[in-house]
Image: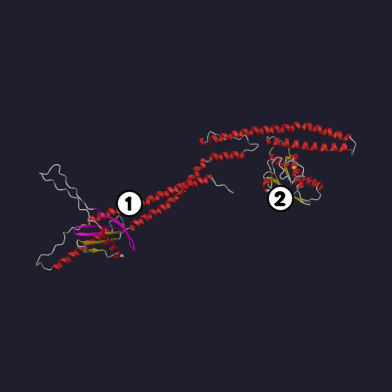
Amino acid sequence: MKLPSFRLRLALLSAALAGSTLVGFGAVSWFQISNAKISRLDAELLNHLMRATPNFPPREEPPVGAASPRRELSKESSRDRSRWQFYEDSLSYAFGSNTKTPVALLVLDANSNILYQSNSLPGDLEVNRLLLARLELAPLAPSPKREPPPLPSNANPSFERPPLIRPRPPQFITEQTATAVWRVGAAKFPNAQIAIAVSLQAVDQEMATIRNIFLVSIPGALLLVAVGAWLVSGGALRPIHQLTGVIQQVTVKGLDQRIPIGTTDVEFVELIQVFNLMLSRLERSFTQASRFSGDAAHELKTPLTILQGELERTLQQVDPGSEVQQRLSNLLDEVRRLSGIMRKLLLLSLADAGKMSLYLVEVDMSELLMEMLEDVEMLAPQLTVQTDFADGLHVKGDRDLLIQVLQNLFSNAIKYNLPNGWIQIRTHQTPTNLHVTIVNASKDIPVNECDRIFDRFYRGDPSRNRKIEGIGLGLSLAREIARAHRGDLTLDSTSSGQTAFTLTLPMKLES
């Protein structure tokens, strides 16, 4: 299971916080702008209602005996309608828009008779009904501001003028018809009643434009915030990456690695100090363990050599076939086995300290493989051997150590093979490396053992190798020898029922 990235979560969290802030700010700004536009429209509508006060006196009855009263009234009505028509046309361009805004106008006289009503808009009847209904609820418009009359000369100084009672200003509401949304205002004057409805189409278009701007700008801002948070978090986590890089380089040959503190943020200083102290303790402990292993192997080498020599000389002096000879022979085998373990431990301690010395010569790997094949035919004649390598495969290395590596690989291929199984030897040469692959039939290695197969003294499931000799140092030493040659030894991924190891050696090796 892949763990989530802290840097990614930090960037997404920053983007989410910024996104919620921007969305909230955009929504509040959109509503504030909408309310501001409606308020400005209301102010302009109130201004036009106040300016629409008729400038003519109330209509008077004609004197008795006057000629043609009907004709005079008709002319006056025609003039009023033309004046209101002109007023309605001027309103269409008077509400802060460069285009003509649909406007509906309704004018009644003091007796609620219709003096003028719009008849050029779709749905006029519905709009006119809205205007008429609004006029019925409209209060009397405020009268023009006048100076209060002066106090009489003989008035009591403590006399207070009564407060001026002004009617409430007209209220504006939003109504919707089948064709549009309207902002409606109405006012009553002593000689007329006026109602104006202004379409909110222009306001809706402006708000739609603002909304589209928000819909484009907010995702862009979120993307910038996410990228910025990704970069900032990367900079903040740089000491962690540096620490991880040093940890990855910590091996038995890299315990002297330390992280500098001078250029590190103060928040990571304590963590780096603890890590450096841990490396110091590990280096000291490993040095002591490696020195002990090397010293013990070196000190035991001489007594074991003397003991082996004495057993060999004594074995030659006893009677052939006697019980003493058999016991001495068993003792000699165990001493030789113990000497081999000491040699491996000594080589491993030298490899850990980086002091494994190589006697570099030109090595014919084809010849070494042929020698190994002869040993296999002699030790395991029941196994089928298949080869696929050419002659003249030369590398530069330590011949004795490379023989030890091949002996270990072939020995494991024989010991862990199936009855009447098989062994395959393949080589692959590139301009820089030589790859030698040894495959054998075997039981499947458990997945949890594949990573530990090169550990020292590790032999896997005891039930699988209870009757197989060894202490678990061969593969570990073989890989150290390969790495000392600037190569490697790896366990390959194969199909079921087989095991494959690949030895990689460079074609050229500097001493």
Q: Nearer the viewer, residue 136 or 503?
A: 136
Q: Most prominent secondary structure in the magenta stretch?
A: strand
Q: Secondary structure at mark 2?
A: loop
**Looking at the image, is mark 2 or mark 1 earlier in the sequence?**
1
Q: Amino acid at mark 2?
A: Asp
The numbered dot on residue 36 is: 1
- Spatial CA distance of label 2 from label 1 is 78 Å
Colouring scheme applied when the structure was drawn: secondary structure
- Left or right: 42, with 445 as reference point: left
- Sort mark 1 into few (<14), some (14-19) or many (20+) by Cα contacts within 10 Å: few
Residue 69 percent coordinates (x, y): 13, 67
Q: Residue furthest right?
A: 319
Q: Quadrant of the C terminus?
A: top right
Residue range of the region highlighted in magenta in the rendering: 168-195
**The quarter of the displayed image where residue 487 is located:** top right
Q: Position of residue 167 (x, y in %)?
A: 22, 53
Q: Which residue is mark 2?
A: 444
Tell me: 277 left or right of 221: right
Q: Is residue 364 visible?
A: no
Q: Is residue 23 left or right of residue 453?
A: left
Q: Is residue 497 visible?
A: yes
Could you classify mark 2 by the number of other residues whose Cα lies within 10 Å: few (under 14), some (14-19), or many (20 or more)?
few
Look at the image and say whether residue 121 sits in the magenta stretch. no
Quadrant of residue 412 in the image? Answer: top right
